[in-house]
Amino acid sequence: MKSILITGASSGIGAATARAFIDAGWRVGLLARRAERLETLTDGIENAVPLVADVTNAEAMQEAFVSFTRPTGRLDVLFNNAGLFGPSGPIDEVPVDAFDEVMNVNIRGMFIAARLAFAQMRKQTPQGGRIINNGSLSAHNPRPGSVCYTTSKHAITGLTRTLSLDGRSYDIACGQIDIGNARTELVEDLNKRAQAANPDQPLMPMMNVEDAARSVLHMAQMPASANVQFMTVMATKMPYIGRG
């Protein structure tokens, strides 16, 4: 049975992806801060393992990875998914503390998870595995007023490229999925903010979160000899090309 550890697994894309992998017969580690939510998602499911940790806490993350990998001695895939959007607005209206919070979760948290996964995949036998980073369309084209989120997601593209390069010697593949407007709590919140700022603005087109989850599953199921380096999956009618 192959294994995957998913960060930010208590809701949204993370929870939907966990369900997709559980249904596909994988051993799935669901990592998030909300213990009660994780227990609800994993209750009675033999191949689902709840892992309570804050992605910014290196010690807690180490314990979670050890707990998940100890029974089998390996990790096949990490879906590096946890993140937050942060405040909207022009840069001079964004508090420095809020910027720091987004960087802490979206960059430091992903770095910690990738570091632990890379170490496990490098030492296990057979060596190798796959890391899938959740980027964003904002890693390419920003939304207006998204300086915190967009900055962090551009950094994740750099992380993806570096891990892909450094992992070659150890059969560790790394790819990035850039998702646009899956129907999640985060996107619903963005819609509410946009409507509050401009009641005449139409709601953003959205797609089912399960479509994003199936895309992650596709990336994870590629043979070791192949890698989806970057995938963009989005609501068909959302303004990605030329948005602004």
Image (cartoon, helix red, strand yellow):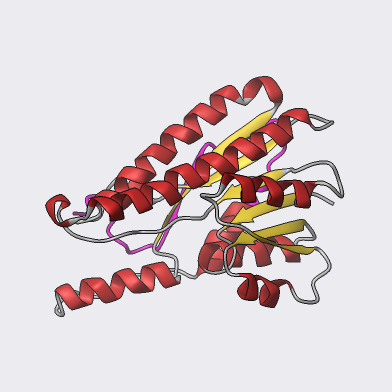
Give the residue at the far front of this rendering.
59
Does any portion of residue 204 appear in the rendered image? no
In this rendering, is residue 96 above or below 208? Answer: above
Residue 8, quarter of picture? bottom right
Q: Residue at x 18, y 59 (%)?
A: 89
**13 in the magenta segment:** no
Residue at x-position 44% and y-position 68%: 207
Q: Is residue 232 magenta?
A: yes
- Between 34 and 128, the residue placed more toward the observer is 34
Q: What x and y, as percent, mark residue 219?
A: 62, 46
Image quarter of the C terminus? bottom left
Secondary structure mostly taken by the magenta-highlighted segment of the chain: loop
Q: Position of residue 139 (x, y in %)?
A: 35, 44
Q: Is residue 123 above or below residue 169?
A: below
Along the line of sight, which residue is nearer the eye, 107 or 96? 96
Looking at the image, residue 177 sits to the left or right of residue 64; the answer is left
Does 50 sit above or below residue 155?
below
User: Taking the image as drawn, is residue 40 in sight?
Assistant: yes
Q: Which residues are magenta?
A: 218-244
Task: Name the residue rendered at 22%, 50% in the picture.
Answer: 242
The residue most toward the top is: 169
Q: Residue 226: x, y in percent?
A: 65, 33
Q: Examine the image and state in which quarter residue 22 appears.
A: bottom right
How many dots with numbers?
0
